[in-house]
Amino acid sequence: MDNEAFTVPASTFTERPEDYELKIYLPGIGKGDADLRMEGRTLTLKTSAKHQNPAGFRQVAAEFELANYAMSVDLPEMADPATLAAKLENGLMTVTVKKRAETQARKIEIG
Amino acid sequence: MNTIMNIDPWSFLDDLLGTSSRAFRTMRARAAGRFPPVNVFLDDNAVLIDLELPGRTAKDVELTLEPEAVVIADKPAAEEGKEPARPAWSRRLDLPFRVDSAKANAKFTDGILRIELPKAETTGVKRITIQG
């Protein structure tokens, strides 16, 4: 649907010595509900869960909305898209991508 | 990688305004994302509470049921040889009726915790037969 509403999920991006880690918070989203694509250096996520509030109940407090999420992120130059791995557990998606070997710091032996 | 920040950037407000009221602290804790948002649903027989807790599982949360309230708190991981850490957050929700604690249940699905609390059949009013 063209006019479907999406929310940008909360996320953290961490650089580690050998790789990058992207954590995306997707409460209410199961494995089958998320679509993750890599195009060039751009990672795109879209979710399509069929959320429903319980039928027959009236809502008396509403502090969050069960949304469909969408976001895209450009990976750093140093990342190697071929090594990208993702898992979704308990509504938290963890994406890791290794740095390209030639960009990693190495110790140089002095002869 | 630990990205948790324990410093409260708004603590100067307490000194400035003398506002250490619960409402203020609650507002700030929410703004800092320190406790999870809830949705609450009611019908005549039960109350349903949904909490947004992505990445958490049953072992990370502690639920305590009082006759007319439920307390939901984070459960810090126990470290050997250390005193148990204080929960990072806790929320107490008052309930509109007495609930049947024996029928209460809670379940995690994809980072959302749903607590289902059926209404107690008796309202706590008990008729006492006078003897003799």
Image (tube, coloured by chain):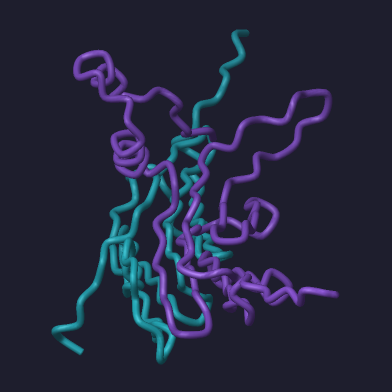
Q: Residue at x 56, y 57 (%)?
A: B70
* Relative height, residue A3 to residue A86 (above, below): below
- Where is B79 relative to B90, above or below? above
Instruction: Chain B: give its colour.
Output: purple
- For the point 37% across and 38% down, the residue is B29
Q: Is residue A51 visible?
A: no
Observer-nearest residue: A86 or A18?
A86
In the orientation shown, which residue stands out farthest toward the top? A111
Depth check: give the residue in front, B63 or B70. Answer: B70
Q: Is residue B25 above or below residue A85?
A: above
Q: In what quadrant of the picture does the C terminus of chain A appear? A: top right
User: Judging from the image, what is the letter of the chain drawn in cyan?
Assistant: A
Quarter containing the N terminus of chain A: bottom left
Q: Is residue B65 something one can see in this rendering?
A: yes
Location of residue A23 in the rendering, given as x and y in whole percent from the top left corner? 45, 52
The x and y percentages for residue A101 are 51, 41
Asked if residue B62 lies left or right of residue A10, the reply is right
- Residue toward you, B21 or A12: B21
Q: Which residue is depicted at the point 43% across and 64% down? A: A26
Relative horizontal placement of residue A8, taking residue B42 as reference (left or right):
left
Residue nearest the observer in this picture, B73 or A48: B73
